[in-house]
Image (tube, coloured by chain):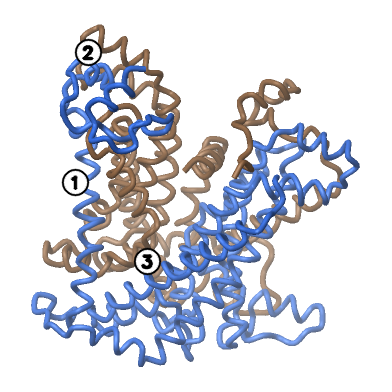
Chain colours: A blue, B brown
Amino acid sequence: MDGARDRAGAGPGDRAGAGPGDRAGTPRQGVPRRPRLRRTPVGSRWAPYVLVAPFFLFFGAFGVFPLAATAWTSLHRVELTAPAEPEWVGLHNYARLLDDAFFWNALANTVVIGVLSTVPQLLLALGVAHLLDVRLRGRGFFRVVALAPYATSVAAATLVFALFYGRDHGMANWALGVVGLAPVDWQNGPWASKLAVSSIVVWRWTGYNALIYLAAMQTIPRELYEAAALDGASRWRQFLHVTLPGLRPALAFTVLVSTIGATQLFGEPLLFGSGAGASGGADHQFQTLGLYLYEQGWVNLHLGRAAAIAWAMLLILVVLFGAVRLLRGGLARRPGRAS
Amino acid sequence: MGDAPHPGRAVRSRTAPARRSRTAPGAGLVRTERAGWGTYALLALFTAVSLFPLLWTAVAASRTSTRLAATPPPFRFGRNLPGNLASAWTDARLGEALANTALVAGTVAAGTVLFSTLAGFAFAKLRFRFRGTLLLLVAGTMLIPPQLGVVPLYLLIARLRWTDELQAVILPSLVSAFGVFFMVQHLRRALPAEVLEAARMDGAGTLRTVWHVVLPAARPAMAVLGMLSFVAAWNDFFWPVLALTQTGNPTVQVALTGLGRGTVPDQSVVMAGALLGTLPLLVVLALFGRHIVGGVMRGAVKG
């Protein structure tokens, strides 16, 4: 390929040893005309920019700009009643958060509900995927069924579950009564309510994650299972030593996505406490950070404070993923199985 | 390292046993082990748990709220379904909301597909300055919570006087970083360099190449992305609830939020609303189920 030669000759000399993966960088100067044309098979030199322009136009206006502007807003007092008159307050909004019992309560609730929903959801999904990963009659049917809860909106799902979990006549308590257990106050119990909210998340996302795992399972070479079986590995050991290692990228993906989802939890707690709305229950027992942001910004009309909460949420995610990376780095350095 | 499975293709051709394998995406790769009755039993349980809340929504929507507030809860259909649906349709403005949502989801899906295909093609097949940086920027923003942008976004649409207008929820969703990524992944494979080269030899400009070569090659992925975006836009909750109100131009989700907050205190009507808001998507799922399943499976592994 002459691309490598061009780059070595014309480029500024960084990493000139053109490996297979460095197609991304373009030489900056002095590139002969012909090869450049050959490498861009379509028309003009501006064509690529024209093609990506619409995306970046909208992306800039409604994606990147608000992102940056949130930082600015969080340093001001901005009231929803007079959004055009921001008043500079420096870090006041952040300082207030640290002092705010409701913020810490919302943070704790977000973590608890996040764990209660993410962990069972992913474990169940793993099991369902394993069930689906064999020769099966009606395979297509089961896969579509797995997506039905995902196609149900947060609002519809939460309204139904709220009725299920009604204290006096809800189906959950009726079922408990049938087996002789005492009814549970699913809306006001500090733990029961978190469990109930989590169950909505688990219901909606288990099938979706199962399909992701299933797709990843199907890329695992079948020879590995045959070899393991020949070595006398039981199904359980095959699952541990063949399936799980092969799922590593998919596991990482789902953990990432559902963790991000958990920090943003909003619709379920908003609608679960019918009537209570943004406070997340009479005692704020299931008010999440997302809901608290909404309450501060759109119920109490303090947009500056809401922006500060948004930044706190990002910060929490960054710290969380930083910690995970560190942890994984530590684990990776230990001599592990070369699977 | 090294634990990444081999790319499936070689494996596929070697394993691919059964004739039935054509029936589903990736079917040739299913473990040849046959499912036992235990597997079917567990899957039946999973099916029941997945579908029961949906079925029961219909049951509850066919009753009266007095019946719903009695023990034991109803398990069989009653006779009030048409009446409750009618109440939800007019009193809770579900009819209008459904029309709004169809418009929003349709536009969002179309825009996402178009813009993602164009940008995806450029990123996948064209060389240009800052390509790597821009693609990294797109990927990076996929990880940032949407909450981070809503306050200024709200100030923006308030200044434009777009609160309660549908463009307030359409425009911000018209492009998607995931969509671009999805298309990049697909087009990298689906568009061999020789084809583009040939188009160029024939003197085709950018526009003609996109129209005659890129779009046909992208069609299957465009269909999948379109359906996924439609479902996502239909169910979008956080931003529509901020930007729209029930009294203005609600989407279904906004209207349901109003129902949940007790604007219509009758629980059976609330359930009828939930049913109406869900039914269109369930129909889409029933019709295009296999493709949506394929899209979720593909998009997730490669995205």
User: Is A219 placed left or right of A79 in the picture?
Assistant: right
Residue A246 is drawn in which quadrant? top right
Query: In the image, what residue type sits under mark 2?
Result: Ala
**What secondary structure is marked by label 2?**
loop
Q: Which circle marks residue B92 in the picture? A: 3
Q: Nearer the viewer, residue A35 or A310?
A: A35
Query: In this rendering, does residue B114 appear at all?
Result: no
**How far across and how far down the image is residue B212, in percent?**
30, 17
Query: In this rendering, does residue A309 appear at all?
Result: yes
Residue drawn 31% across the image and 9% down it: B198
| Same chain assignment for discs 3 and 1 | no
Compute the Cα span from label 1 to label 2. 27 Å
Compute the Cα span from label 2 to label 3. 54 Å
**Eye-nearest disc, 2 or 3:** 2
Residue drawn 55% across the image and 37% down it: B294
**What secondary structure is marked by label 3?**
loop
Determine the residue located farthest toward the left in the rendered image.
Answer: A85
Q: Residues within 10 Å of mark 2 (few under 14, many from 20)?
A: some
**Dot 2 or dot 3, earlier in sequence:** 3
**Eye-nearest disc, 3 or 1:** 1
User: Is A27 placed left or right of A114 in the picture?
Assistant: left
**What secondary structure is marked by label 1?**
helix
**How far across and how far down the image is residue A144, in percent?**
61, 44
**How far across and how far down the image is residue B191, in percent?**
39, 21
Q: Nearer the viewer, residue A180 or A133?
A: A133
Q: Which circle marks residue A57 in the picture? A: 1
Residue occupied by mark 2: B204
Q: Residues within 10 Å of mark 3 (few under 14, many from 20)?
A: many
